[in-house]
């Protein structure tokens, strides 16, 4: 089963709520059940066009020919992370904001099925 949770305005419960056997998902996407506390459900977005990531993105997949994923600024965003995956047979270009770099390069190229995990150091992006 695949679930996509985007911008929950209220927590939701999944399972046998009346019987007390359920998982609650908080508005921030965190699971709040005794056995799953602290685990994270990523907010995912599937893109088929060029796209600039936003502060609400976490996991973004791309499936389109010759597309570009543009990163937001890393400045002042220490610790912000993104996961970017290319589903298409053509390379996906991941472009840092303006002159910001990703592991010292202004762009990174992702082959099909490749995932890029990055985190901001407060001024640039670092591959993790």
Image (tube, rainbow, N blue to C red):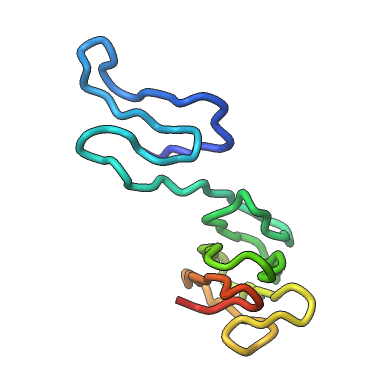
Up/down of 14 relative to 110, above or below:
above
Q: Classify residue 100 by image quadrant.
A: bottom right
Is 94 or 64 nearer to us in this picture? 94
Is 48 or 12 nearer to us in this picture? 12
* Residue at (54% x, 31% y) in the render: 8
Is 61 or 38 nearer to us in this picture? 38
* Residue at (65% x, 88% y) in the render: 105
* Residue at (26% x, 10% y) in the render: 18
**What x and y, as percent, mark residue 12?**
43, 24
**What x and y, as percent, mark residue 70?**
71, 67
Q: How many numbered marks are there? A: 0
Left or right side of 21 for 118: right
Q: Classify residue 120 by image quadrant.
A: bottom right
Residue found at the very far top of the displayed protein? 18
Residue found at the very far right of the displayed protein? 98
Left or right side of 74 for 116: left
Left or right side of 37 for 120: right
* Residue at (72% x, 58% y) in the render: 49
The quarter of the picture where the C terminus appears is bottom left
Is 11 or 47 nearer to us in this picture? 11
**What x and y, as percent, mark residue 7?**
58, 35
Up/down of 38 relative to 125, above or below:
above
**What x and y, as percent, mark residue 16?**
26, 17
Up/down of 96 relative to 62, above or below:
below
């Amino acid at each position: 089963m695949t679930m996509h949770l985007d911008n929950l305005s209220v927590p939701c419960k999944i399972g046998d709520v009346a019987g007390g056997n359920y998982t609650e998902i908080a508005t921030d996407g965190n699971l709040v059940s005794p056995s799953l506390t602290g685990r994270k459900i990523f907010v995912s977005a599937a893109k088929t066009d060029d796209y600039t990531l936003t502060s609400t993105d976490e996991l973004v997949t791309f499936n389109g020919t010759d597309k570009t994923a543009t990163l937001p600024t890393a400045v002042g965003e220490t610790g912000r992370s993104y996961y970017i995956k290319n589903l298409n047979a053509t390379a996906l270009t991941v472009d840092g904001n303006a002159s910001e770099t990703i592991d010292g390069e202004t762009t990174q190229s992702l082959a099909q099925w490749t995932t890029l995990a990055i985190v901001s150091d407060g001024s640039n992006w670092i591959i993790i």
